[in-house]
Image (cartoon, coloured by chain):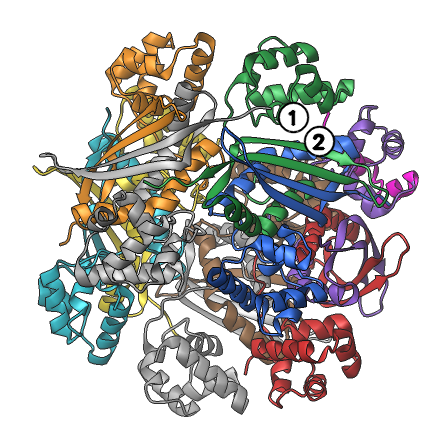
Chain colours: A yellow, B cyan, C orange, E green, F blue, G purple, H red, I brown
């Protein structure tokens, strides 16, 4: 059993039972974004969380250790085609240099870590049309010199 | 005079005078991210803001209309090399499918707009190492069917 | 059962029975373009339309929910090879900048949405050779500034 | 003097005088899309139209023949980055196979020509948000067999 | 049964029986190039020719309609590796601009159609080494202006 | 003075004087295709032809040796964007495997040379629309085994 | 049975029996390079050599005709990753222009054929470290002009 | 003065004086291939050879040290377009795996060095058409294990 | 049985038994990096080490010779997506030119071999956060001139 | 004055005076690798070090602040062509997965930082041929979960 097979099992359960990512996240006490990304094979859950999720969804027992394995993260294409994901890529293209300028104006020469990192996503009702809010928080890492 | 030339002038003034993006944004009453992105040629400022900024920085008078022109947004490379910008690209690669799942779980089949969109960036002091926080808000657009 | 399998079933039925996209669209009261694109896995039908189509074509019952699932849109290649599709790509290449100029001359800095969007295609008889007419209508989205 | 230089001259005049593509098209009795695309160097105007436009805009006399020269059409990138042009590219990606199905259902094995082709673009006021309408008409060319 | 499967069947018959493309073309009264390209899945035969070929080769009856289906033409790679096909690609690279100059010198701004198109190939005995002759004939399509 | 500069001179003369490729070819007793390709820097003329052409067009004397230099053939892009040249590329994509089958059916395992090669192009009047005819003749080279 | 399957059979025999490429080449009286490349599916053997090899290795009888089929040569990637093959690619990159200069200094405008071509490889003992020697011989083909 | 400028000077001298690569190589007592590649900026000559060549060609005195500088080797494109260089690339594509098999059959797991490497090229007269011979010799490097 | 199958077996054993790369390396008396890379199919083990490892892990007997086979090294993508591997790629991008300058300042025009090469990796405890140390040692190969 | 111009100045001084990277590094009390990479525009020096280096080399006074500016790191090509740099790239390709396995076996799911990172390079004399040693040390960053 590997990560791709566990992802497939979870997606099948999800379609069958109508269970949401939000409720899975709640059941194991982790955030929605992290839970979803681990179920999609892009992160490794702590073993106890992984076992809890496997039990919660009625997956075979071996699924737990697999969810806890360290993934090799592979993204399918350098330029995503799905419109929902492309818009995020476009934001990096249009605002990447801007974010670099502002991060470095605030913190000096360095980066925002994508490893020591967390992210949240919410839908905010709005009379002019609902909005999606994404919040990211990453550790600032200054370039070391030596 | 074109957008690239105005960007160059602004960057030169910035190096000379030490003025920050934050203070430019404050001087014209717009957000840091939008102000920076317009100065880098990736967005068009309303004409009055553009003129105000030109005056504030002591740029030639023609710079105002140029800052108000509609840009053709070009990003240099499909995969960014600068480590600060690459980390953002990596986030889209690692978490893109996750965000799509959660946006669509919350709002149905649709996307977060990158056009009717705003973004903020802050440095948050933290004893274990300062953090960068980025907040995005984009209109949710459901796919139309017809 | 996934979207690719349902597409395959529909294409098989279509070859067997000679049913057209036009008649499928009529049977469920949706447009030809949208109906075809949803059958090819590029859009999600509302559940009731999806079930109606499944019944109309004599597909297994599970096909309905699958047609209603939100797709991850993947296009095979950045430059299409089929001559019929390439011509459309070429139009974007040759006239893309022109359309941008005219859309923005008419509406200001902004875009035509490809999400809040509809499209129709007709063949128009013409003594000098029949013509194909394509009509697109997309919401104009002005760039927000903040 | 080459096509790129004439394009630059026209864009400079346009910025200086505020003249629109619409009025240039009207002055020479051609469509907006074709006029704009020829000014951007992507099509060749008939010589008399070209001379009329040069006079109308006060360009040097040599500009006429240059506008009438046959261009080598080069598009900058296989995947456009400007969001306004990208949306058009995305439409081809998402709906290309659909258009092929429908064009060929209506006309048999063949294509819509991008050469014997015309296109119009309008902004349509709409209380729920204005819309952009694009109409294309291309000759249907059946594949010859021999 | 799909086009790829029919191609495979024809190639298998060809290896078994030693029948040539030339004799298949003769048997159905079509040209060698068109017959071969349709057997390889790159063109659609008229239904009666397709049925005749299926019978001639002793293929199952369903092969006829499949040969008559409209193909989605996909070429494997942008730059072909097989030396025999690469040489053709090289000719387009080395002589493409030349052909454009001469086609447009003779016919005005326009193209040679690859749809309303036919092609023949022969081996011509020559004491200094045999030669291959390829003849192409495509309709001249002038760019429309409007 | 290099090949690119001589090409530019010839194109300028051509625009000024209206001289055609056909008449240049006739003046030096070579074919249109070869003459044009050498003027565009893709082939080397024999020295006497090169000098004759330089004199005929009134180019500076050094242009002769430059036209006789051996070029390094570079084509701008792997997939051509100009529609006139793209159609040729498409023909190779759609019919490449077909031509390979037929060339090798007629001559055994081998290729048509693109070096020991000649090509002609004509416009053929036709009441249903004029046609372009291209004829290629290349030496057949069998693969050596050893 | 196709060329890939025969290659697999030969490689399996080779692993089982420890037979070398050198001895296979000797058994059929052909060169090592050609024999190996034909076994790997990149060349076609004369039918009698192919049958002899099939018998020599104890392959099924159909393997002979398959080894004699004309291959479609496909190389996996434009830039090879295996270090042993990459070094050869690097030699072409570093010395390609040099070889062109020298070939054309010696023979005039033309190329070394890769079709009418043979190649040998040897290991030469050397006290400072053994060396590999590769010898290529290809027919010189002058560019034809016409 | 940099390597590209020195290359340009040498090529200009060569055109002016008709001096050959062969005679330059002889004048400084090095091989043709190495001399040419160093003049084209792909290798560094020993300082004394470099000075001798500069004197021999009547280049300015600074050219010597520049020819002796260590180059950063950049090749223009991953797939060469010039037919003379492409044929070499094709040989690597078609025979790369074959050479790897034979090199490793003779020497064990390892490679032929492209650094501790030499190469010669000759034209060999032949009544059936002259031939080009290329000989390469590179040190065999076994993979170290540790 | 091929290298990919043996890799799969080893990874399965590793998951089942919890055995580490470090202990495998120790059991056969080779370094961790080399052992791991050979198990992943990127290097060939000496036959005795390979057999010892197969026995140690309880793999079928044929696994030994397979581990000793010479691999064809293929890396999946030119730009790695996994963040852990990307960071290494980024180091080459950011510091590649720097390393070249320093290697050649110290050793003259040449390279560090990746074949006659060894590498070690350690985790070093550090109160400010543990560190990873990688040490590489490769033979210096000076460019030969001839 | 920008970073590229300062790099050019430093390289010119270096050629003129023969000063080494090693002595520059020593003069300002920083490591060779960091000093070189900052001089090549890939890192930012602390302001005092930058000024010291500018004085040490006799550069104009504005060079100091430029060396202290935060760079946008751009690497020229995704696959490096220079053999010295390519070998490093190859090491990442061949050993990347191996390093990931070992880093994560030692530290859990995480990466070695390329930001909080230092590197040293030395030439080690060796009777069997000198060796290059590279040592890297980067902070281990565990993936956060939340």
**Residue count near mark 2 (Cα–Cα under 10 Å), binned few <14, some 14–19, many ≥20:** many
Q: Which quadrant of the figure contains the N terminus of chain E?
A: top right
Boundaries of the magenta span: G1-28
How far from the left and from the top, in percent, is residue A23? 23, 30
Rounded to the nearest whole Å, what is the CA distance between mark 1 and mark 2? 8 Å
Q: Quadrant of residue I33?
A: bottom right
**Residue count near mark 1 (Cα–Cα under 10 Å), binned few <14, some 14–19, many ≥20:** many
Residue I94 left/right relative to F96: left
Instruction: Determine whether H128 is above or below E66 in the image.
Output: below
Q: Which residue is rendered at x = 62% and y = 51% of the image?
A: F32
Q: Which residue is rendered at x = 81% and y = 63% of the image?
A: G130
Residue linked to disc 1: E36
- Comparing H127 with H143, the one in front is H127
- Comparing F7 with I6, the one in front is F7
Q: Which residue is rendered at x = 70% and y = 15% of the image?
A: E27
Q: Is residue G11 magenta?
A: yes
Residue linked to disc 2: F102
Q: Is residue F8 magenta?
A: no
How far from the left and from the top, in percent, is residue C25? 30, 16
């Amino acid at each position: 059993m590997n990560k791709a097979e566990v992802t497939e099992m979870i997606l099948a359960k999800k379609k069958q039972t109508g269970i949401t990512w939000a409720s899975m996240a709640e059941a194991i006490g982790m955030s929605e974004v992290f839970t979803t990304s681990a179920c999609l094979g892009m992160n490794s859950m702590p073993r106890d969380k992984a076992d809890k999720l496997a039990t919660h969804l009625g997956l075979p027992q071996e699924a737990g250790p697999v969810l806890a394995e360290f993934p090799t993260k592979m993204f399918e294409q350098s330029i995503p085609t799905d419109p929902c994901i492309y818009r995020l890529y476009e934001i990096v293209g249009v605002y990447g240099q801007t974010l670099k300028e502002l991060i470095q104006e605030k913190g000096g020469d360095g980066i925002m870590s994508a490893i020591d990192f967390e992210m949240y996503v919410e839908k905010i009702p709005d009379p002019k049309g609902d909005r999606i809010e994404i919040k990211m928080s990453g550790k600032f890492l200054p370039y070391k010199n030596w």
